[in-house]
Amino acid sequence: MKMCEALAQTGQNVTLLCIKNKNENVDIFPHYGVEKIFDIKFFPMLKIPGNNLYNPLTVLSAGIYLLVCSIYILFDRSASVYTRDPYGAFALAMLGQKFVWEIHELPSSKFKNFLFTKVLKSNAVVMIVCISEKMKSLLFSQFGFIENYVKTMVAHDGATPSNEILKPRYELRKELDLPQNSFMAGYTGNLFSGRGIELIFEIAEKLQDVTFVIVGGHDEDLTRLRGILEKGSFSNIDLHGFQPPYLIPSYLKAFDILLMPYQKKVSLRGNKRDTSEFMSPMKMFEYMASGKPIISSRLPVLMEVLNHEHNALLAGPDVASEWVLAVTLLKENRQLGERLAAKAREDVMNYTWEERAGSVLKHWGIT
């Protein structure tokens, strides 16, 4: 949604093709906090019970959805097509439709490897967008044949620093049901394996004078975490569950410091895929844009953007003592936090959605 908004802000006529979820009755533009300056075309896809992605009915339903989307695109051969879905990329490649492919994952199975190879060997891919330098390196290592004939660029995820929250912190804390007088360390995002939630619990147990707020997760995640809370002495952990994207900037403004405790192995979608080597978390850029100091795991791919004691404090992903020291340091030295936050906000201006969209269009050859 943010990338569509940014592309539209450059003057492009943008239409987003996506699945229509019949159970959602939300106004999608304000839900994501974006301007209604592009179109959305919804296509239905059957909801198959269970989480088995290889269920024949799931595969059939997804195939029909992709076919309908592809036919819609083929009716306008003059359209410039951009996708981040590997299955959508495969469908477009088989139909001979030229497109740009933004890659967010690398193949982790023989089937995915076959799919990537077919797409990358087609003549349909006019440009590849990688979300980190490490991803580009790994992609070239795994599919060396693309290096000489497919245009490739790196574009990290982004943020929108212009979304300034003007309300004072005490008012935001009241609206969000947060304690007024606590020093507050916040985390926002998914609760999948490798996001460091267990590490937050470990830090919280050692720092009882700090309130730790976790925003995100669905019912099954929260049930699991509440079970952990009941077994320990965690009166300083506050679970706020899933919140609509437009509210996240308000939460970030209400916190004192922000935590990004990614582990050495990070999973997506049911704990099946490790992305720790090449990820570019949107959370990182949203944190940088918030004007609050960040403590992040010391992972090489995150250090493409974050630098210790420059725009963040970095700690070992599995060394709780380093996190305790970092939280304590920021609690006691507010000037350090202000300096790190100001530098992060300055640096994130190189990673705005507007900058990203402009860079992609420039490399694509669209003005």
Image (spheres, rainbow, N blue to C red):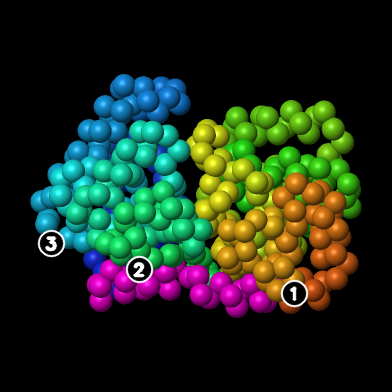
x and y, in percent, of residue 361 in the image: 31, 70
Q: Is residue 331 magenta?
A: no
Residue beneath label 1, please? 338
Secondary structure beneath dot 3 equals loop
Q: Is residue 342 magenta?
A: yes
User: Which quadrant of the rendered structure holds the N terminus?
Assistant: bottom left
Q: What is the distance, in whole Å, between disc 2 and disc 1 at their CAs?
A: 33 Å
Residue beneath label 2, please? 360
Q: Which mark is on residue 78?
A: 3
Answer above or below: position of 88 versus 310: above
Marks 2,1: beta carbons within 8 A: no
Task: Tell me which numbered mark, 2 or 1, is placed earlier along the sequence.
Answer: 1
Task: Tell me what residue is drawn at x 42 percent, y 69 percent.
Answer: 356
Task: Tell me what residue is drawn at x 31 percent, y 40 percent.
Answer: 115
Task: Tell me which numbered mark, 2 or 3, is placed earlier along the sequence.
Answer: 3
Part of the protein shown in magenta = 340-367
Q: Quadrant of residue 183?
A: bottom right
